[in-house]
Image: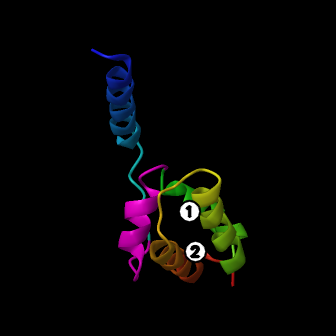
Amino acid sequence: MRPPLIAMILAAVSLIVASIPAAGQENIALKQAPGLDTVEQNCAACHSLDYIVMNSPIQDQNGWTATVTKMINVLGAPIDKADAERIVEYLSANYGKK
């Protein structure tokens, strides 16, 4: 096999293994609300959704906007503008400081 193919296979296996909860852990269930599907599709592609719950006590709408912007501009998350806005709306409404 060619080295890039091996790297792709290893990356795929790593993603699968990382998505399996460890013994005694459950997959996180976020609040049912408009935008949840967009959050799950975009955010869970790169990291656990636990980060949303862990960061919610310190994030307001500006904080979530900055976080989503960082994910796109700094970390390279492939999230389009409409989805980014929907993600911020969902996070602000359901996991934002009031």
Residue 41, quarter of the rendered image: bottom left
Left/right placement of residue 88 relative to residue 60 reads left
Q: Residue at x 39, y 70 (%)?
A: 38
Is residue 85 in the magenta section? no
Residue bearing mark 2: 95
Q: Residue at x 53, y 81 (%)?
A: 89
Q: Residue furthest left?
A: 1
> Which quadrant of the figure contains the C terminus?
bottom right
Left/right placement of residue 66 relative to residue 24 reads right
Q: Do we see residue 32 in this rendering? A: yes
Tally of marks: 2
Q: Residue furthest top?
A: 1
Q: Which residues are magenta?
A: 31-47
Give neighbour class at mark 1: few <14, some 14-19, many 20+ (Cα, 10 Å).
some
Q: Residue at x 49, y 49 (%)?
A: 47
Report the Cα–Cα distance between label 1 and label 2: 7 Å
Using the image, tell me which numbered label, if any, was put on residue 52: 1
What is the x, y in percent for residue 60? Answer: 69, 77
Whichever of labels 1 and 2 marks the residue nearer the N terminus, that label is: 1
Left/right placement of residue 87 relative to residue 75 reads left
Amino acid on which disc 2 is placed? Tyr
Give neighbour class at mark 2: few <14, some 14-19, many 20+ (Cα, 10 Å).
many
Q: Secondary structure at mark 2?
A: helix
Pointers 1 and 2 in contact (CB under 8 A)?
Answer: yes
Q: Nearer the viewer, residue 25 or 4?
A: 4
